[in-house]
Amino acid sequence: MTAELTDLARHAADAAVLNGDSRTAFGAPRIESARDDLDRHGLHAMVRVLRKALPDGEFHAEPEIAERLGVAPRHRWLLRRWLAELTARGWVSGDEQTGYGAPREVAAPVRPDLRAVCADLGFAPELARFFERANERLPELLRDRVLAQELLFPGGDFRTAEAAYRNNPINRYLNAATKEIVTWAVGELTTSPVRILELGAGVGGTTADIVPGLNDLAVDYHFTDLSSFFLDTARAQFSAYPWMRYGIVDLNADLPNQQACDIVLAANVLHNAHHCGQILREVHNLLRPGGLLIFVESCREHCQLLTSMHFLMSPKPGVAQPGRTDVRAGTDRIFLSEREWLDELAAAGLQTQVVLPETDHPLAALGQRVFAAQKPL
Ligand SMILES: C[S@@+](CC[C@H](N)C(=O)[O-])C[C@H]1O[C@@H](n2cnc3c(N)ncnc32)[C@H](O)[C@@H]1O
């Protein structure tokens, strides 16, 4: 089934983004260069802030830098990630023992305007404005004087989030592949109704592309998120689909209490797991034999996210940071690599059937992947 399902998903995903063009016309070099520029905008924003705490000739360890910048304790992991990214690139010298020195002067992005970067990646101007606002207000974000939620959902508006999670080529690609895999699975599975549990459904960036295709099929779709903030909007957005149910599910606490199901969907949420391996084992227990886990994840660090979206990942006081005891332990990383996910899936007893886009695809440079893995019959 692996090759057949991959072919189906790849074909559907390509059709959603290539508009009949060849992959060459899609422009891998343009995407790679814009991706590097996006990283560079984030790195420059980090440097602008760090200069205030690291004057020329002085060396300071991370706790001193945090104190000088007034970094809220829950965001300290971000400061550590910044220092790791900047030292890995040679933009900052030093380490935790010797302290860190002042950032060097480094080359500007090829595209100085974030809107041009986002345009070349197919992202809407709303997302560029969000990144700009986050970079400008970085000192306040670090101090918790402004929340990333306020910048991402200004006045409760979901358009910026939709620009990030839905209305762009990579998400069109991933959602089309996901839709194809879900539709295929609903046709193949013998249970009726086919029970689908979506975790971290949020603004419904993936849901909206999937549910219209399920309308005439025997499915029970449980739209869930950690936050009730999203559920009322989803009830209104998906009111045409009476077979959808809504509920709060915390993937770190509630999986053992869920009903057995046939498909677990999770778009850009599994990295919130305190322990990814543990969560995959719980998903394995939840799935009926032959059932599928289908998930979307970013498998590379994005420096512009480290100065914007990742503020959403800082835990509330007293809550554990995701990944402290799993394969990410000691690194402060949010994202697992593709290899790490494949290893974790295998260790949890799930057989990987699909990973897209493949490395030779122009969109692969962005690092996001859709995985489909099956519980053996
Ligand atoms: C990056 S958003 C992705 C939203 C949506 N799946 C999409 O792709 O459009 C992550 C979502 O995961 C939810 N989330 C965060 N931690 C969670 C947890 N422990 N359990 C369930 N959902 C969680 C957030 O509330 C948010 O809606």
Image (spheres, rainbow, N blue to C red):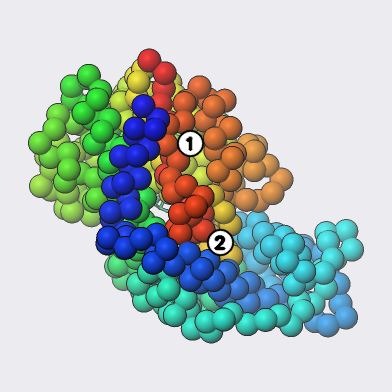
Pinpoint residue 230: horizontal percent, then vertical percent: 30, 52
Q: What amino acid type is highlighted by mark number 2? A: His
Which class describes the residues within 10 Å of circle 2: few (<14), some (14-19), or many (20+)? many
Residue 252 tag number: 1
- Residue 302 is marked as 2
The quadrant the N terminus occupies is top left
* Left or right: 54 as drawn, with respect to 344: right
Query: Would residue 148 appear left or right of 62 to someone viewing this image?
Result: left
* Along the line of sight, the residue nearer the viewer: 127 or 178: 178
Q: How many residues crowd mark 1 within 10 Å: few (<14), some (14–19), many (20+)?
A: some
Outermost residue toward the top in this view = 377
Instruction: Work out how far the residue at label 1 is from the one at label 2, CA to CA, in angstroms.
Output: 24 Å
Q: Nearer the viewer, residue 10 or 206?
A: 10
Mark 1 C-beta closer than 8 Å to ligand 1: yes
Left or right: 170 in relation to 347: left
Q: Earlier in the sequence, mark 1 or mark 2?
A: 1
375, above or below 104, in the image: above
Front of the two marks 1 and 2: 2
Question: Which residue type does callout 1 highlight?
Answer: Asn
Question: What residue is rendered at 23% in x and 30% in y?
Answer: 186
Classify mark 2: helix, strand or loop.
loop
Residue 229 shows in the view: no
Question: What is the x, y in percent for residue 136?
Answer: 53, 80
